[in-house]
Amino acid sequence: MENNALVRMQTFPNYLDALEFVYQVGHAAETEDHHPDIFMNYKRVTVKYWTHRANGITELDFKMAGIVEKLVMKNYHERDTKNQTLTA
């Protein structure tokens, strides 16, 4: 947990993999109508979930964090040597 938010940082093998992950997170966010802060710096992506109305973490944030974690495990975990787990 970082400043009342769920934060997931992931380093990818290359820029295009990082960009594809951002796209997948964005698609999931649209589907669930709950949008994270997403920061991308070359091969590193940071996803931050918290609910503005609650000024903190809600069940929906945990749900979305779980979806993000599944995306990482499904698509990138085997190729990633710098994997960092979600902290809460």
Image: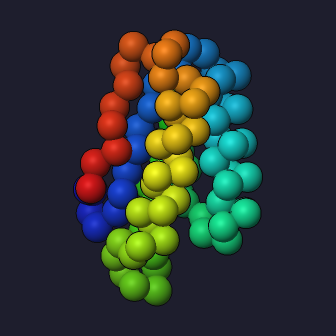
Where is 2 relative to 40, above or below?
below
Q: Could you say where residue 55 lies in the image, as x and y percent from the top left?
A: 37, 81
Q: x%, y% of residue 57?
A: 36, 72
Q: Report the quarter where the C terminus lies.
A: bottom left
Direction from residue 45 to residue 56 in the image, left or right: left
Residue under the point 40% across and 85% down: 54
Residue 34 place in picture, x, y as percent: 60, 69
Task: List x then y, in percent, for residue 38.
Answer: 55, 50
Kindly tell me whether residue 52 is visible in this rendering: yes
Horizontally, is 22 left or right of 27 in the view?
Answer: left
Residue closer to the observer: 32 or 23: 32
Which residue is painted at 65% across and 23% down in the image? 17
Q: Is residue 83 above or below residue 57?
A: above
Q: Where is 15 relative to 40, above or below?
A: above
- In this view of the protein, which residue sits in the foreground, 78 or 4? 78
Q: How many marks?
A: 0
**The N terminus - image quarter:** bottom left
Residue extending farthest bottom: 53
Q: Is residue 24 above or below residue 77?
A: below
Left or right: 3, with 64 as reference point: left
Give the camera-side residue of 57 and 52.
57
Which residue is painted at 41% across and 63% down in the image?
62
Query: Which residue: 33% across, 37% down?
Result: 85
